[in-house]
Amino acid sequence: MPQITVDYSAPLDRRGFALALHPLVVETVDTRIDACKTRFREVEETVIGDGSTNDVVVHVDIALLAGRTDETKARLAEAVVALLPAYLKEPEGVHVSAEVRDLEPSYRKA
């Protein structure tokens, strides 16, 4: 925990983003840096609206153990959205979003 998934279709400095994101998560939600796990999934195609433009997206999903307030989760999501453009090779026109949510009670790790 935290489990972080980044879906992206824009050119992204993945490693640089993860290395900047982890301390941000630690600072915001009071966790350990070695608990942060980020995986990246490249999206081959995206369609936004009527599909008339070649839009690209980056969406960051952060799943945490339950117990953080909605305000803390919103603050983290806002910080992630603010951080992302620095790691995009061409930030103009990229649709950036983030969601911070609780892990399901069935979550287990070994």
Image (tube, rainbow, N blue to C red):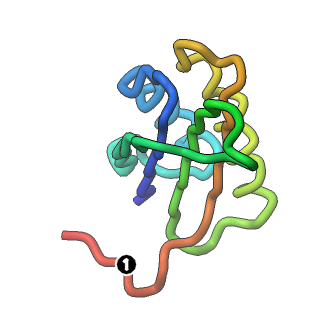
- Identify which residue, 107 or 57, lies in the foreground: 57
**Given the image, on which type of amino acid does mark 1 rest?**
Tyr
Query: In the rendered image of this protein, does residue 47 appear above or below residue 57?
Result: below
Identify which residue is drawn at 60% across, 39% down.
Answer: 27
Extreme residue toward the bottom, this view: 106
Q: Is residue 52 above or below residue 109?
A: above
Residue at the spot 67% in from the left edge and 37% down from the top edge: 96
Could you tell whether 85 is left or right of 37 in the image? right
The residue at which mark 1 appears reads as 107
Horizontal and vertical percent for residue 21?
Answer: 51, 33
Expressed as whole percent of the image width and height from the top left, the position of residue 97 reads 67, 44
Q: Residue furthest right?
A: 71
Q: Nearer the viewer, residue 37 or 42?
A: 42
- Check disc 1 and report its element: helix, strand or loop: loop
Quadrant into which the C terminus falls: bottom left
Q: Is residue 43 left or right of residue 25?
A: left
* Residue appearing at x 76%, y 54% in the figure: 74
Packing grade of label 1 (10 A; few <14, some 14-19, many >=20) is few
Residue at image x 47%, y 26%? 17
Q: Point out residue 104 in the picture as x, y percentages from the top left corner.
A: 48, 81
**Quadrant, the N terminus:** bottom left
Q: Is residue 17 left or right of residue 97?
A: left
State the residue in front, 42 or 82: 42
Q: Is 10 in front, or is 53?
A: 53
